[in-house]
Amino acid sequence: MHKASNMEISHYKSPLGWIEIETKEEALIAMHFILTPKENQSPIKKINCEIEAQLANYFNNKSLDLNFKMKPKGTPFQQEIWKLVLQIEFGKTLSYSELANRYGNKKAIRAVGSAIGKNPIMIFIPCHRVIGSNGSMVGYAGGIPNKKWLLEHEGFLIQKSLDL
């Protein structure tokens, strides 16, 4: 863990590799995959321990209790899209166009896609649950293989193309 401008950084070893957790002022501000932690971790704050416990619950198919603040940095539009993404239930998906419709502007598909791509809190703001209209696995900052893994982990059946 290191401290930069009151930011606390800790690391969690998930089945998909390392996840870096960034907190500031008792709120989760970012969480993303990294190849390997940059340094040894020292004792961490209570909120980081709680986030790691909830990640363990997620990966062990236990219920989540997200009783900590999430304060992802983004524009007002991005914040609105992330709030809509938060409403997608475990094991369910929504297409980019359906999300644009929920936002109230069906023509905003590209803007919605851009906002989702800038989501700084993966898994807990479940942008991996947003897929192409045809069910395709498109656009995930954590990588398409991780997106597929997360969806399958949640019980969503990925359509496999037929081998001819």
Image: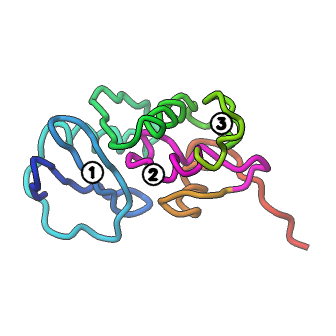
Closer to viewer: mark 2 or mark 1: 2
Which of pointers 3 and 1 lies earlier in the amino acid sequence? 1
10 Å crowding of disc 3: few (<14), some (14-19), many (20+): many
**Residue at the extreme right:** 164
**Image x and y of residue 39, in percent:** 15, 69
Q: Which residue is mark 3?
A: 100
For discs 3 and 1, the disc positioned in front in the rendered view: 3
Report helix, strand or loop for mark 3: helix
> What segment is highlighted magenta in the picture?
112-136
Is residue 126 rendered magenta in the image? yes
Asked whether the beta carbons under mark 3 and mark 1 sit within 8 Å of each other, the answer is no
Q: Earlier in the sequence, mark 2 or mark 3?
A: 3
Give the quarter of the image for residue 19.
bottom left
Q: Secondary structure at mark 1?
A: strand
- Which residue bears the numbered disc 1? 21
Q: Tag 2, which secondary structure?
A: loop
Residue picked out by circle 2? 118
State if disc 1 and disc 2 touch (CB < 8 Å).
no
Q: Is residue 66 magenta?
A: no
Relative to 121, is 1 above or below?
below
Q: Position of residue 139 (x, y in %)?
A: 59, 58
Report x, y in % for residue 99. 64, 36
Q: Amino acid at mark 3?
A: Ala
- The amino acid at mark 2 is Lys
What residue is shown at x 53% (from left), y 45% (from top)? 127
Residue shown at 18%/42% (left/top)?
Answer: 24
